[in-house]
Image (tube, rainbow, N blue to C red):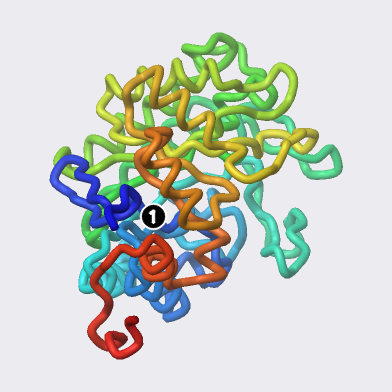
Amino acid sequence: MSSQLFSPLSIKSITLKNRIAISPMCQYSAVDGFANDWHLVHLGSRASGGAGLVIQEATSVSAEGRISPEDLGLWKDEQIEKLKQINAFIVSQNSVPGIQLAHAGRKASAASPWNGGRKIPLNEGGWETVAPSAIAYHQSENTPIALDKSGIQKVISDFKAATKRAVQAGFQVLEIHAAHGYLLHQFLSPLSNFRTDEYGGSFDNRIRLTLEVVAAVQSEWPNNLPLFIRISATDWADGGWNNEESIQLSKILKEKGVDLVDVSSGGAVSHQQIPVEPNYQVPFAESIKKETGIMTGAVGLITDAAQAEEIITSGKADLILFGRESLRDPYLGLTFADELQTDVEWPKQYLRAKI
C-alpha cells in the first residue's frame, strides 16, 4: 500500500525518508545546559523508532534565555561534544538530527513542570528576565526588563553564535523558535510588545527582530541545509497576533530563504482561549501553505496514522510534527507504517519482531 506519510521529502540537500518529525519537546533534564544520556536515549529511540526527522528540544542561545534551569543550551563550546554523539546516533538510524534554537524572554527563570512550573525568585536561584516591554506574563510575577538596543544586539549575536555551534555539533536541520510566547513571539505580538521604537508598533517593526535573527542564523547556517521557523499562527486573544499576520510574515520568510514554517499557536498571553480538538491547528498550516507556497509543518493533537496520512495526502501540510504522541510511543514511525500497511526498514536488531 502506498502511503504519502511515508513518502520522502527533499529540502535543499537533505531528504527525509518520511513526513514524520519529532517535535522539539523540553525534557527539563540538563545541567548547566549540557545534554546527557537521558537526551541520547530520548532522541535516539525516536530515531530508531522510524521518524524521518528528530528535532532537539528548545535549546537556549544564552543562559538567561532558558525556560528553566534544566533546559538544554548552546551558549558555550563545551556543550557541543555530547550533542555530536547524539546526532551521530540519529544519523546511524537513517534519521535526520534537527535543533530548535530559542530564547524564552519573559517566560524564562521558571521551575520545571514537576516542580510546579512557577517563576523562580532571584533569591532561590532565578534570574532577571528580558522582554520587548516591561510587562510580565502573569501579573503576580516580577516585571521583566525591557531590552535596550544593546540587549537586542546581544540576542541576535547569541543566535548567531549558537548556530555556529549547531553546525559543529552535526545538526542538519535548524529551527528558530518564534512561537509559544517566547522572546521572538513576544516581539511579534501587540499584546506583549508596547515599544515605540523601530521594534514596536507597526507590523514591519514587530517582525524586525525575527527577521534580524533569521539573517544572523543564515550567516552561519550552511545554505544547503534546511532552515525552519516555528510560529504561533494566532494568539487566540483579541487584539493579538493573528493568522493574517502569520501569512504575511510567512511570505517574507519565504523570500528571505526560510524553507518551512512549523505552524503552532498560542502561548503569548495567559488569558488566551484555545478551542482544543484534534487537528485544531492544521487549518493554519494549510492556509499559510496555500497563500504563500512555503512548506509547512502541522502540529497539535495529531495522534493516529490515518489522521496524519489525510493531512499529507490532501496537501494541508508537508510534514507532521508529533509531540505527546511520540512520548507515548517512541516507535511511532514503525507503528504507523504497520497501521498504513506500508513496508519500512526496521533496525536490524528488531527485525525478529517485524510482522
Query: Residue at point 69% right, 23% down?
Result: 191
Which image quarter is the N terminus in?
bottom left
Q: Name the foreground residue: 120 vs 231.
A: 231
Residue appearing at x 60%, y 31% in the figure: 186
Q: Secondary structure at mark 1?
A: strand
Answer whether residue 292 is visible to the viewer in this image: yes
- Please state which amino acid type lies under the numbered disc 1: Ala
Residue 222, image x, y percentages = 17, 43
Q: Is residue 317 left or right of residue 257?
A: right
Farthest residue, direction right:
140
Quadrant in the picture for the C terminus: bottom left
Query: Residue 228's image quarter?
Result: top left
Nearer to me, 169 or 341: 341
Q: Quadrant of residue 88?
A: bottom left
Location of residue 282 with respect to 201 vertically, above or below? below
Which residue is denoted by mark 1 in the rendering?
A: 21
Residue 190 is situated, as x and y percent measured from the top left of the image, at 65, 19
Name the image quarter holding residue 40.
bottom left
The x, y position of residue 302, in whole percent, is: 54, 50
- Most extreme residue toward the top is 202
Picture residue at 55% right of the left edge, 34% below the top: 232
**Residue 344 on image: x %, y %:** 26, 68
Q: Nearer the viewer, residue 6 or 93?
A: 6
Q: Is residue 152 left or right of residue 110?
A: left
Categorize mark 1 by other alpha carbons within 10 Å: few (<14), some (14-19), many (20+). many
Left or right of 274: which side holds 55? left
Up/down of 307 relative to 91, above or below: above
How many numbered marks does the figure carry? 1
